[in-house]
Amino acid sequence: MKLGIVGYGNLGKGVELAVKQNSDMELVAIFTRRNPKDLKIKSDAKVVSVSEIENWKDKIDVLILCGGSATDLPEQTPKYAKMFNVVDSFDTHARIPEHFANVDKAANEAGKIGIISIGWDPGLFSLNRMYANAILTNGKDYTFWGKGVSQGHSDAVRRIDGVLDARQYTIPVEASLKAVKNCENPNLTTRHVVAADGADKARIEKEIKEMPNYFADYDTTVHFITAEEMKKNHSGLPHGGCVIRTGKTGYGNNIHNHVIEYNIKLDSNPEFTTCVLVAFARAAYKMSKEGLSGAKTIFDVPPAYLSSKSNEELRKLFL
């Protein structure tokens, strides 16, 4: 299976490493908006200007899109779904229905597969929420993120004029996590921001706190720090979180409580996310080979399509 990457930031670099661990895949091209000569890559893939991507339509089985959800993917995924089978990590939850519709139209018209919003949330957490809801029909859902760095939210902050670099840390409120009182997202979030010389910090802080779909609904603190401090203390990208569903079964005085929990702890958020993207690239390839088309989410992909193992091997090893 021949893969391509659009974008060579943290996600693009992670995909490059993940492909090396999958013997049924080959990374053939990395497409960039930068000067291709400036990229120092860790594989034998060709580095190509994104302006030449159309020339690769018949040379790539699946294109993995590694841009940001704030501005890149809403434009890129429908655009490239007209030429390639694509997988993206679009993570603006409130805009997923809109994004799905745009990709579905483009992919169906071209006879391509577009798997969207793949990662761990949305993605693996979404699937676990769905499973738990189907099993414990009388219950409540809770999702806690962190402590860790959100790639999508950090990227959104970096798009603000005057911001040189940023890290967004999500920190769950311990009391809420322990009590699991309700179905809200009771998170305390803290942002570390490097501002350009002379930038209006009050304006930047206001824009961050009022950003819809990202920070407007959360308790947000903004810290301005130096580039040196960012490099020294905030260069890592750990993350994690858990999805919990509590439910009840039984009748009358004979009621039983149940908890379903799915938990992840990541040393590298982008490297883990890209492992998920690569597995779903395999699924996109298989679905395309079957003649399917249109936008798909994690709910639409059979689990066996993620694995390089045969169905016989899966039954023997994991069932």
Image (cartoon, rainbow, N blue to C red):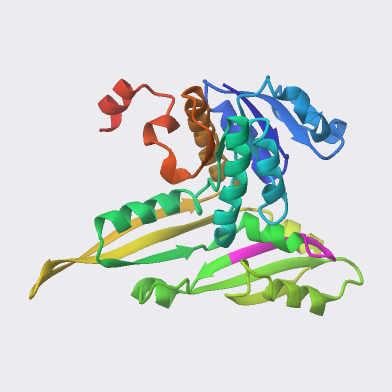
Name the residue rendered at 35%, 77% in the picture: 181
Locate the N terminus and report the quarter of the image it occupies.
top right
Seen in the image, is 57 located left or right of residue 20? right
Seen in the image, is 229 located left or right of residue 306? right
Residue 123 in the image: x percent, y percent? 48, 49
Seen in the image, is 22 located left or right of residue 156? left
Q: Quadrant of residue 312?
A: top left
**Residue 266 magenta:** no
Q: Quadrant of residue 306?
A: top left
Name the residue rendered at 60%, 58% in the picture: 150
Residue 23 in the image: x percent, y percent? 52, 21
Residue placed furthest toward the right: 198
**Residue 167 magenta:** yes
249 in relation to 174, above or below: above
Seen in the image, is 253 located left or right of residue 21? left
- Residue closer to the observer: 276 or 290: 290
Name the residue rendered at 63%, 71% in the picture: 215
Q: Is residue 236 visible?
A: yes
185 in relation to 21, above or below: below
Name the residue rendered at 51%, 40% in the picture: 276
- Residue closer to the observer: 92 or 13: 92
Locate the C terminus and report the quarter of the image it occupies.
top left
Residue 16 in the image: x percent, y percent? 64, 32
278 in relation to 311, above or below: below
- Magenta span: predominant SS is strand
Residue placed furthest toward the left: 253
Counting labels gives 0
Q: Is residue 233 visible?
A: no
The residue segment tinted magenta is 159-169
Residue 58 in the image: x percent, y percent? 68, 20
